[in-house]
Image (cartoon, rainbow, N blue to C red):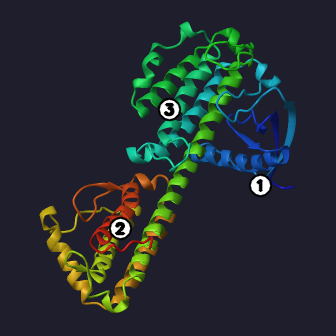
Amino acid sequence: MANRHKVNAYLALAEKGVHLHVPALPGCFSRGQNEEQALQSLQVELKKYYADLARHGESAITPAHFEINIMERNNRATGPFDPGDTAALFEIEKTPIDSLEIQRYLSLATYNRADLLDLVGNMPGRLLDWQPPDSGSFSIRRILRHIGNADEWYVSRLISPEELPPEWETDAEMEIFDFLEMSRRTASEMFGRMNSARRSGEVVIPTHFTTAPSEPWTLRKALRRMLEHEREHTNHIREVIQACKDYLRQELIAAREDITAIVAQVPPAEVSTRLITGTWTLHEVVGHLVDWEILAIQSLRKALVGEETRKMDGFEEERVDEINAGFASARLAQPWGQVWADYTAARDEMIALLDQVTGKDLSIKIIPPWDGELTVFSLFSGWPDHDREHLEMIFEQTGLSPKQ
């Protein structure tokens, strides 16, 4: 077959599934519930790996298909899938490693870290700490802390606790991105200074800082696992971001459903005459919601294509009631059907914009039409709250509730 490339892979058969590793491409691995799934996944991971190399400036042509040869089957591992699992040590990882090879591993680690920081480096704190409701899932901040801790732990598999860098003693107190820089820098320095015994392929069985005191390690295995681990958790972060986007989408839809439920309880003849929030009719409330949503959408559009956003001319916090009154008056002059159509169209566009954003996009800063500064994430996460604020006002003054 044209453009076919042979790859030697090493299989770890564990209690929780199958891993395939490609030592010639350090950090490239796949997992599956069985061997067939792991092989299928490895075809995908190999293409991603070559694409990553090309993106980092290396000349890498991705073959159309890989012929995967399994060189070793190892069943002496329990993972790695969860904390405390053990990773396989393959026979090829007991061979000597020279300085150039170590530097190759560390160069690839630099690529991995650049990819990670490109994804999370400008994330707002609320997104770093976001977790799905009623879920035991890690926040992104916790995943990042785990990545940094793992860097240190892989080094500690090969040297005694007394030899570890003193910076590690107080690392829990460091801000997350300072910690990531420090842990990777010091770990790389320690790997680069490993003694001749470790470079010879010597097998070490450490008993400190471990729940698996019989797990064997070599320098090659520790370097491989550092690369695999960071790539794995960078993908994990992407999954958390997608879960966050899914949650925000559900919130936007749920808020619209609540407003629709309120509208359904008001007779059409009363939509534009019955006061439901102070001096506003339902017609004016929905008009208010859609006008501000349109302004937010305009800011989002600009931010997502790199255009400068700015506060609306003439907006001042003390003039908000005046501005809202002007919006409401203009909307009241329109047919109710047009106002409702504008509202549903605006919410559809808000949801469509959310579907388009990437993980990096969520960190983009926005100067909204009103006072203050937001990120794409905080705008999307806060918008259902604006809806619910007005729904609560409606309930307090009329007793109308979406749950009726």
**Foreground of the two, 153 or 126:** 126
Left or right, 387 with reference to 113: left
Residue 171 percent location from the top left of the image: 44, 22
Crowd class of label 3 (few under 14; some 14 to 19; many from 20; radius 10 Å): some
Q: How many marks?
A: 3
Q: Label 2, label 3: how many angstroms apart (C-alpha)?
A: 35 Å
Label 2 environment density (alpha carbons within 10 Å; few <14, some 14–19, many ≥20): some
| Quadrant into which the C terminus falls | bottom left
Q: Secondary structure at mark 2?
A: helix
Residue marked by disc 3 = 145
Up-down: is 283 above or below 374?
below
Q: Please provide percent x and percent y for residue 38.
A: 79, 45
Is the Cβ of the residue at disc 3 closer than 8 Å to that at disc 1?
no
The residue singled out by tag 2 in the image is 387
Query: Which kind of residue does numbered mark 1 sit on?
Result: Ala
Residue drawn where x is 67% and y is 36% of the image: 27
The mark nearer the N terminus, 3 or 1, is 1
- Sequence order check, earlier mark of 2 and 3: 3
**Viewer-nearest of labels 2 and 3?**
2
Question: Which quarter of the figure is the N terminus placed in?
Answer: bottom right
Which quadrant of the view contains residue 243? bottom right
Q: Position of residue 261 (x, y in %)?
A: 44, 76
Marker disc for residue 64: 1
